[in-house]
Image (tube, helix red, strand yellow):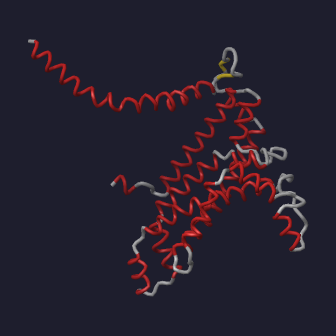
Amino acid sequence: MLKNIACLWQNKQHRIAPYLFISPFYILFAVFMVYPLCFGLYLSLHEWSGIGEMTYVGLGNYVNLLKDPDFHLAFSNTLWYMGASLVINLVFSLLLAVLLNSALIKAKKLFRTIYFVPIVTSVVAAAIVFTLFYDRDYGLFNVLFMALGRKPLDWLGSTSLSKLAVIGLIAWRWTGFNMVYFLAGLQSIPRSLYEAAVVDGASPLQSFLKITLPLLKPVILFVVVITLIGSIQIFDEPYILTGGGPADSSMSLVIYLFRTGMEYLNLGYAAAIGFIIFGMTFILSWIQINLMGGFEGEKS
């Protein structure tokens, strides 16, 4: 009898042991991911300043967001950043990667290092340097403009130019980072394909369109998705460079979330903004992945 009980207990231990070994991950995931997400959703349905009791408002915060002109402006600015970042970072990153992967460029390691340096540079330091570059009276860009006989531009003080100034900093910081992904993708394409294309009489442009782009599709998909997600969540560059101004002309959704939660202490409204950002990120990433046929190879 005792022997049977001991065997049953030993079998039970063997079944439980694997779950005990992996339980730390699930516990940490629940504490630091699931709980904040659930609490954020709960908070978005309430009014709360961080002190005192919460007031349940249901979907009131989301309804108010639809009528909030500041939210509309922040949403519009964020869409502007998304579109510009996708076009600039995707095109320039791919062109740089193709050039650095070709035999035309010498000292490739030096150029790769130069282009990757911005990503390891502190965004605060970069923003301060760019603030000097954008200075209306003594900035580098206006000095170049005046050398060409043009009037100086108020990059950071103009509502029409502030977003361009932010995009310039974003392009400088992230083009080299995306270039590394494209470079890795290019180097994984067999050289024999290009050699066969040359034998068949294909031009460099035809090789690029028929070989490079199709085989780079997974990398392009990945770069598009991470650029999109990063653009939706953009905060550092506009906040340090312009503070979201002038007149909120460069304010992103995350800056508006930060102001609403940390400066105005309207935490429920800020949580609702956060879930709007989460929804945008999830939906657009899902659409892009499915439209481009991403990860089909993994399924098969």
Q: Quadrant of residue 21?
A: top left
Q: Is residue 114 above or below residue 226?
A: below
Q: Position of residue 213 (x, y in %)?
A: 49, 69
Pick the quarter of the image with the C terminus: bottom left
Q: Residue at the location (66% across, 50% down)? A: 122
Q: Quadrant of residue 277?
A: top right
Q: Quadrant of residue 100?
A: bottom right
Q: Position of residue 87 (x, y in %)?
A: 64, 61
Task: Looking at this view, name the residue that lies furthest to the top.
Answer: 1
**In this rendering, position of residue 79 left or right of residue 294:** right
Q: Position of residue 80 (x, y in %)?
A: 71, 53
Q: Is residue 244 above or below residue 92?
A: above
Q: Is residue 197 above or below residue 269?
A: below
**In this rendering, position of residue 234 left or right of residue 220:** right
Q: Residue at the location (59% across, 39% down)? A: 278
**Number of dots carrying numbers:** 0
Pick the quarter of the image with the N terminus: top left
Q: Residue at the location (53% across, 49% down)? A: 285
The residue closer to the viewer here, 167 or 82, is: 167
Q: Position of residue 132 (x, y in %)?
A: 81, 56
Q: Residue at the location (67% across, 14% down)? A: 53
